[in-house]
Amino acid sequence: MLGSGRKYVGSTKALSAFKMLSKRLNWVLDILDPRAAEQYKTLQKVSMEKLEYLQGFNAINQSYWQGRIILYNRQTPPHRDTRNPPLEWTPLHAGGEFTEGGALFIEELKLRLRYLPGDLIFIRGRLLTHSVEPWSGGQRISAVYFTHDAFWKSLNLDLTL
């Protein structure tokens, strides 16, 4: 019980630390794709009705996305986010102290995007093969938000755009 309590406290502290970022991401999606934002709001409402434990987490951090991963000094190889719905917007946020490099490369488009601390990128991560290039000048921390397709389906919902 004590170990579970410590994990819960750690999780809630981490969620609280990213509260402002989550609000920013929600705001961007509201503007970028209002139809998707409405579907995420429905997902949030239904999930909290059926999975009561989410009410506590949502009180701390009201993100449209159910999953978050924090990557420390990780250079990601080319990949697609195969567990996400095909048309999901995947927000990527860079942080840390690095000063050069770390660009996001989108293979199909041969597109290299600046991805320095403070930058925010929305991509369709399941449709586009993407990777993070080498960087220098300090630690790199990135936050990636997502909601796996299985979560949508578990609630009898689909992200349809």
Image (spheres, rainbow, N blue to C red):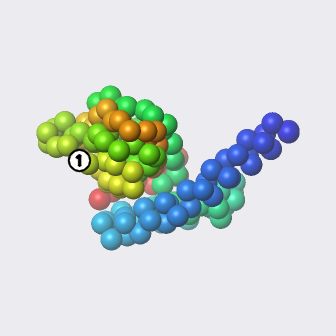
> Residue at the location (49% across, 60% down)?
21
Please state, as top left, top right, bottom left or bottom right, where the C terminus lies in the image: bottom left
Judging from the image, what secondary structure is the residue with disc 1 in? strand
Q: Which residue is mark 1?
A: 113
Visible in this render: residue 133? yes
Q: Residues within 10 Å of mark 1 (few under 14, many from 20)?
A: some
Front position in the image: 149 or 59: 59
Visible in this render: residue 51? no
Q: Position of residue 46 (x, y in %)?
A: 56, 61
| Extreme residue toward the right, this view | 2
Please state, as top left, top right, bottom left or bottom right, where the N terminus lies in the image: top right
Q: Quadrant of residue 25?
A: bottom left
Q: Position of residue 17 (x, y in %)?
A: 60, 56
| Extreme residue toward the front, this view | 137
> Residue at the location (63% across, 58% down)?
16
Front position in the image: 150 or 134: 134
Q: Quadrant of residue 24?
A: bottom left
Q: Position of residue 30 (x, y in %)?
A: 37, 70
**In the figure, is residue 1 to the left or right of 33?**
right
Q: Amino acid at mark 1?
A: Leu
Instruction: Please tell me how many numbered marks the rendered image carries.
Output: 1
Q: Position of residue 89 (x, y in %)?
A: 34, 53
> Residue at the location (19% across, 36% down)?
107
| Extreme residue toward the top, this view | 77
**In the figure, is residue 130 to the left or right of 117?**
left
